[in-house]
Amino acid sequence: MAWETTAAPCPAWHNDMAAQFRYTLVMIITVDGPAGSGKSTVARELAKALSIAYLDSGATYRAVTYHAISQGIDLRDEAALAALTKRIDLELIPHADGVGVLVSGRDVSRQIRAPEITTKTRYAASSPQVRAVLVKLQRKIGNRMGNFVSEGRDQGSVVFPDADVKFYLDASPQVRARRRSDELWATGRLANRRQILQAIMDRDSSDRSREVGPLVKPDGAVIIDTSEMTVAQVTEAMAQIIQERI
Ligand code: DC
């Protein structure tokens, strides 16, 4: 079974911690890391286990990209992309699978996960003007959420630098490529491991080299190498660290 879809943990700590969180005024937890490090799965599981909100910042870049394509905007035209980002009516809503994404009230949660959007989101992600607008939007969403786990590339470094607990998840490119191809096989899709590895390395390089909001290990972040760990082990290790801090 693919790492990303391994069954969620639900040990005893989950009820105790969820109860403690009811009395915590605001707790911001950030989870950053490269594609395939497992951060989406564990951020979602952690939020669920702690009964707090989940902020998927990548969904905002995906939604802008999807909306721009559907409006016929050339993604390389940064001014047009930034103008669209300023006027987009974008909402993230809680959803059984993590997060629902609405653009102008229309549910585009599934469409923004299409491979074409995954590849083309790099235009929005590398635009300083788009990032400036989305960083503000992510803070506004976070403000409304209260306690939350936010996941992305720059959450602990740029968007929520004062977060209470910051994590940086990593895994070797080979392990990340294996997880991705297992995931594709599990859903009956053909996967060429070498091409997947190349795509992961390309995304790493674009995420790490952009001038604004690059993927970095945020100051003070707890670094977890998930290469040899299961989802349950990673989530539990993170929960223990959070427990020590609340
Ligand atoms: O995590 P994801 O695959 O849904 O992210 C989609 C894209 O958005 C990916 O190219 C990285 C980028 N991204 C970003 O630049 N900053 C974030 N905080 C989150 C995602």
Image (cartoon, rainbow, N blue to C red):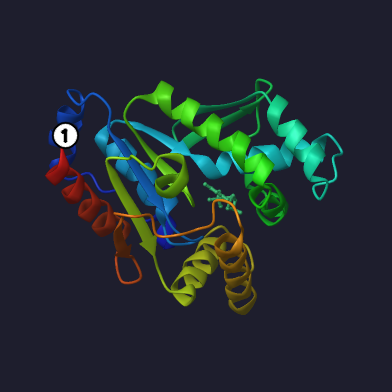
Q: Quadrant of the C terminus?
A: top left
Q: Residue at x 48, y 61 (%)?
A: 34
Quick check: 2 left or right of 242?
Answer: right
Report the residue marked by disc 1: 15
Callout 1 crowding tier (Cα within 10 Å): few <14, some 14–19, many ≥20: some
The location of residue 89, given as percent across then percent down, is 66, 23
Q: Residue at x 38, y 43 (%)?
A: 161
70 up-or-down from 213: above or below: above
Quick check: 174 left or right of 223?
Answer: right
Amino acid beneath label 1: Asn
Q: Quadrant of the N terminus?
A: bottom left
Residue 7 visible, this orientation: no
Residue 89 visible, this orientation: yes
Q: Residue at x 12, y 46 (%)?
A: 244
Quick check: 11 left or right of 150?
Answer: left
Quick check: 74 left or right of 228?
Answer: right
Q: Is mark 1 within 8 Å of ligand 1?
A: no
Toward which corner of the image does residue 169 lie, by quadrant? bottom left
148 up-or-down from 181: above or below: above
The location of residue 42, given as percent across then percent down, is 36, 50
The location of residue 98, given as percent across then percent down, is 45, 37
Secondary structure of residue under mark 1: helix
Viewer-proximal residue, 29 or 116? 29
The location of residue 46, given as percent across then percent down, is 30, 43
Viewer-proximal residue, 148 or 131? 131
Q: How many marks?
A: 1
4 up-or-down from 71: above or below: below
Q: Residue at x 75, y 32 (%)?
A: 84
